[in-house]
Image: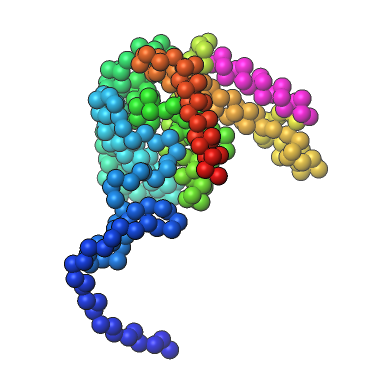
């Protein structure tokens, strides 16, 4: 049997006593205890927790407006996606027999789609006010809405010391995956929403860039991936045929699917687009890409030297 819960006396509030500031042993941060609470209150003046390449300030008023509108735009995208998936599930299960019952759900989905388009156009109109739009509009398949969406996710690109940090923000660095480990997710900086956005950007470039720069980059990278795999003794085949060969005694290590090669080449193309976007952004602010990269390397060496001296 469960033991009855024992009643305890109410904790008497302590009198107002000014507690001296002390330092936590692990975090080494000055803290202050409240007058009547046992929780720890960290000073506002302390340095922020280390987060991977997340911009905290927006130097441009247009960028600030894009970020605000993009938050609403993404909410309507998520709402429309959820409603559409629910309608598809109902249609698969019941067919047209319950059309009247989920009619209101269809109305909600249509309304969410309409609002999504309206807020997307707002983000696009704001993106056209950016200086970098003069470069972006010359890229086939890369419209104002996609540019505004990247700025909405990344903020002011001047806050990134290198193009690699922007790639990490958008989930395009090697090893970035969705994980249940919260600490690893913070270190990797992975976000499914940002990675999905870059996938959409890649699809648009692939279909609409024609014979442009980025479609050429994709084709060259795809040929390179096939050549590298064949040089390592790995056969590139359609995924449907690989399963049959494995059932006959082969191993998956002997093959690489064409879809795998396609995704690797597309991710490489997306990385190059971000690199060019970042380079054009800082160029418009009077800094060359090479100078910015050199400055970032010097700062990194200074940090390493400082850490080596402390150790």
Q: Position of residue 30 (x, y in %)?
A: 34, 53
Indicate yes or no whether the magenta region holds residue 219: yes
Quadrant housing residue 68: top left
Q: Is residue 95 visible?
A: no
- Return the residue found at the far right: 249
* Foreground pick, 32 / 243: 32
* Foreground pick, 143 / 127: 127
Quadrant housing residue 155: top left
Q: Position of residue 170 (x, y in %)?
A: 45, 32
Indicate yes or no whether the magenta region holds residue 95: no
Q: Residue at x 69, y 33 (%)?
A: 256
Q: Is residue 127 left or right of residue 85?
A: left
Quadrant where the N terminus sits is bottom left
The scheme the figure's colours follow is rainbow
Q: Position of residue 42 (x, y in %)?
A: 31, 53
Quadrant housing residue 48: top left
Q: Residue at x 22, y 63 (%)?
A: 18
In the image, residue 284 sits, relative to residue 160, either above or below, namely: above
Q: Is residue 7 left or right of residue 216?
A: left
Q: Is residue 161 visible?
A: yes
Q: Position of residue 296 (x, y in %)?
A: 48, 26
* Foreground pick, 130 / 215: 130
- Please identify the dominant SS of the magenta region: helix
Quadrant where the C terminus sits is top right
In the image, residue 209 sits, relative to residue 226, either above or below, namely: above
Q: Is residue 76 left or right of residue 194?
A: left
Find the magenta span and give its range. 215-233
* Foreground pick, 41 / 266: 41
- Return the residue found at the far front: 309
In the rendered picture of this protein, how many numbered marks are placed on residues? 0
């Amino acid at each position: 049997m469960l033991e009855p819960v024992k009643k305890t006396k109410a904790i008497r509030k302590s009198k107002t006593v000014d507690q001296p500031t002390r330092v936590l042993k692990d975090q080494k941060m000055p803290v202050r205890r409240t007058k009547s609470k046992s929780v720890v209150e960290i000073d506002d003046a302390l340095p922020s927790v280390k987060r991977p390449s997340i911009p905290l300030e927006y130097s441009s008023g247009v960028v600030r407006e894009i970020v605000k509108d993009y938050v609403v735009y993404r909410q309507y995208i998520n709402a429309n996606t959820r409603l559409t998936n629910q309608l598809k599930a109902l249609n698969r299960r019941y067919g047209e027999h319950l059309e009247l019952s989920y009619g209101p759900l269809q109305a909600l989905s249509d309304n969410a789609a309409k609002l999504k388009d309206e807020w997307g156009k707002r983000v696009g109109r704001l993106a056209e006010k950016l200086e970098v739009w003069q470069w972006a509009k010359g890229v086939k398949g890369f419209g104002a809405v996609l540019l505004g969406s990247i700025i909405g996710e990344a903020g002011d690109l001047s806050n990134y010391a290198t193009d690699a940090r922007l790639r990490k923000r958008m989930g395009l660095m090697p090893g970035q995956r969705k994980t249940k480990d919260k600490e690893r997710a913070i270190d990797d900086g992975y976000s499914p929403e940002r990675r999905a956005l870059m996938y959409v950007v890649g699809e648009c470039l692939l279909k609409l860039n024609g014979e442009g720069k980025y479609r050429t980059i994709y084709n060259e990278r795809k040929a390179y991936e096939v050549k590298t795999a064949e040089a390592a003794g790995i056969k590139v085949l359609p995924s449907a045929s690989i399963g049959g060969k494995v059932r006959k005694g082969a191993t998956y290590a002997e093959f690489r699917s064409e879809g795998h090669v396609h995704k690797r080449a597309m991710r490489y193309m997306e990385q190059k687009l971000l690199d060019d976007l970042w380079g054009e952004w800082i160029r418009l602010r009077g800094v060359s890409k090479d100078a910015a990269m050199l400055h970032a390397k010097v700062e990194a060496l200074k940090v390493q030297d400082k850490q080596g001296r402390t150790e």
